[in-house]
Amino acid sequence: MSEKTSFLLEEKQQRLRLSPQNSEAAVSPLKLGERVREIRLSQSLTLEEASKRTGLARSTLSKIENEQISPTFAAVSKLVQGLGIDIPQLFAEPKEHHGTKGRRDITLAGAGKPHPTTTYDHEILATALTGKKMLPYRTTVKARNFTDFSEWVRHDGEEFMLVLKGEVLFYTEFYQPVSLKEGDSAYYDGDMGHAIVSVSETDAIVLWVTA
């Protein structure tokens, strides 16, 4: 496991421990259709797209969401696998929305939580907020060659990277390396192998946001 992946897993585990969602009680299966719709919409999926992911007919999904039928165990298994969730998530209480929550966290320059590794010096931002859906961090890229990494960096979720200073060479598992300079950015799947190295005279600095 790479150091960056280990760092992201540690942060994810800490957020899960602190998140109030972990204390939510399970609800009656009568709300299962509502929960399926909530999960589908949270992933910005149409019924047609969800049908392709789960292997369930569009009409079947519609009937499940509208409580017209109760899904079989086989259908539940397809929903879990297709939507990329765990069974407990499917039976969790649908969230109630009461307008804007108004959360805020400010990190002054240089006041983030440091997390150095052999290839990157991470500065974790917005550390006061718990239960975040994104993990932002500012990173000084110390790696100078792809061989500085023992393996591809991989982790769950999607990731956005913006070059703040210098120039990096962005390596990805299924694409040719690309040079990114100040102001350039990339958005990619975190489970696709990736890594960046500095190619400027001084160590490059990037902003990373992992969801």
Image: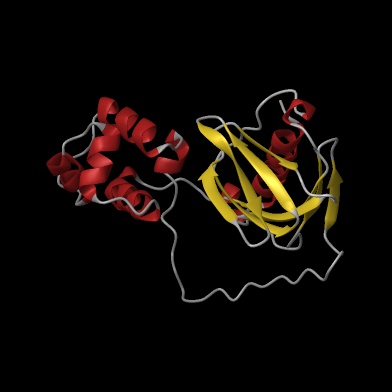
Residue 191 seen in render: no
Q: Quadrant of residue 42?
A: bottom left
Percent coordinates x, y for residue 18 in the rendering: 69, 51
Q: Quadrant of residue 149?
A: top right
Measuring 39% from the left and 51% from the top, which residue is drawn there?
Answer: 43
> Looking at the image, what colour scheme do you see?
secondary structure
Measuring 78% from the left and 49% from the top, which residue is drawn there?
Answer: 200
Task: Pick the quarter of the image with the N terminus.
Answer: top right
State whether residue 181 is above or below residue 26.
below
| Frontmost residue, 68 versus 102 | 102
Measuring 63% from the left and 51% from the top, which residue is drawn there?
Answer: 180
Percent coordinates x, y for residue 127 in the rendering: 76, 59
State whether residue 10 is above or below residue 108.
above
Q: How many marks?
A: 0
Q: Is residue 116 left or right of residue 72?
A: right
Measuring 21% from the left and 34% from the top, which residue is drawn there?
Answer: 56
Percent coordinates x, y for residue 163 in the rendering: 68, 56
| Frontmost residue, 204 versus 38 | 204
Q: Is residue 193 left or right of residue 11?
A: left
